[in-house]
Image: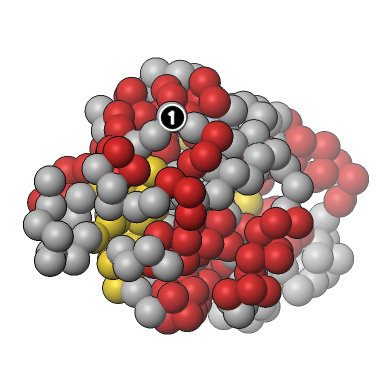
Amino acid sequence: MKDSMEKIKALALFSGGLDSALAIKVVQEQGIEVIALNFVSHFFGGKNEKAESMAKQLGIRLEYIDFKKRHTLVVEDPVYGRGKNMNPCIDCHSLMFKIAGELLEEYGASFVISGEVLGQRPMSQNSQALEKVKKLSGMEDLVLRPLSAKLLPPSKAEVMGWVDREKLLDINGRSRQRQMELMDFYGLVEYPSPGGGCLLTDPGYSNRLKVLEDDGLLKEEHAWLFKLIKEARFFRFSKARYLFVGRNKESNDKIDEFRKEKNLNFYIYSSEVPGPHIIANTNLTDEEIEFAKKLFSRYSKVKGNEKVILNNSGKLEEVDVLDLKKLDEEIKKYQQF
C-alpha cells in the first residue's frame, strides 16, 4: 500500500478527446496526479493541437509514446481479430495498456486509467471486450475506467482506497449527453481530431492496406508504404508492384521525400505544368510507364486536354491530348480495391 503522505499517480491513455479528458478530471478531483500518454503508431497519434490543448486545460504532463513497431505486429496478426475494417481495437487497446503498465515504475505511478465507456462501441467496448483487453494486456485490476467504473468490477485503485468508488461514474451506452454536461461543468473545450482519428477504421484506407497485406507487405520494414497509400493516389500493377501519384503539394512533398529515402529510380514531374509527382516501388514495363505519363497529364492542371511536357526520370517527354474515357477505364483496372 502507498504511504498515506505519498502522492498517488496514475497514467492515462490519452487521445486528447473528451472521454479521456473527463476520465482524467474525475480522478484529479480525488487528488490523483495524472500523467497522460498519447500513443503514436503509423495509423494514429502524434503531436497535435487537440492533445496539447486538452493537456494544457487539464494542467497535466503529456508524453508521446512511440509504439509503431509493436503496433504493426498487432495489426498484422491480432489475437481477437479486426472490426469492420482493418482495426484490431481489442488488441490495440490491450497493447496500450500493456505498455502503460511497463511504464508505471518509470513514472512512479500506481495504476492506469482510460476514457472507455461501457457500451459506447458495441464491438470493442462491451463488458466482454473490456475484460479481454485487461487480460490480454496482463494488467488485470490495475486498469481503472472512471467513466463507467460503477458498472464494472472494482479495480485495485478502488480496493486499495486510492480512489473512492462512490465518486466514480456509471456512464453507459452511446449517448453523449452526460459527457457534454460534464464538459460544461468542468469548463473544457474540445477540439476536432486532426486527420480524422485512426486510419484503420477508414474503409478506403483499409481497402488499400488490405492490398499490402495480401501482397505480403503488412510489415514494419514496409511502413513507408503505409504512409504513401494515405498521401497519394495508389495503383497496383501486380503483386507488390505499385505506382503512387501525388494529390497536391503536400502529397508531392511526401513522394519526393520517399523517392530520396528509398533511392527510387522512376520519377515523373514537370517544371512546365503544375501537376502530380509520380513514383513507383519497382521497375516498370514500357506500357506501365506510358500509363504513368498519362496519369500525370490527367491529374495535372491541363487535365489531359492539352499536350504537356514532363520529366520522365531525367528525360523530357511529350504527352499528347488524352482519350479520357479510355484512360478512366484503364485506371479502374489498376484500382480494383
**Alpha-carbon neighbours of circle 1 within 10 Å: few (<14), some, or many (≥20)?**
few
Q: Looking at the rendering, which quadrant does residue 232 occupy?
A: bottom right
- At x 32%, y 67%, the residue is 31
Colouring method of the image: secondary structure
Q: Is residue 274 visible?
A: yes
Q: Looking at the rendering, which quadrant does residue 316 occupy?
A: bottom right
Q: Is residue 143 left or right of residue 175?
A: left
User: Against 157, is 333 above or below?
Assistant: above
User: Against 270, is 227 above or below?
Assistant: above
- At x 63%, y 69%, the residue is 183
Asked whether 210 or 76 is in front, the reply is 76
Q: Residue at the right extreme?
A: 325
Which SS class for mark 1? loop
Q: Is residue 53 left or right of residue 293?
A: left
Q: Which amino acid type is marked by label 1?
A: Pro
User: Against 224, is 184 above or below?
Assistant: below
User: Against 208, is 111 above or below?
Assistant: below
- At x 59%, y 28%, the residue is 126
Asked whether 14 or 203 is in front, the reply is 14
Q: Is residue 68 left or right of residue 87?
A: left
Task: Specify the quadrant that holds the C terminus.
Answer: top right
Residue at numbered disc 1: 153
Q: Is residue 218 visible?
A: no
- At x 28%, y 67%, the residue is 33
Please provide percent x and percent y for residue 149.
49, 41
Please provide percent x and percent y for residue 182.
64, 65
Please provide percent x and percent y for residue 42.
40, 50
Please provide percent x and percent y for residue 110.
20, 50
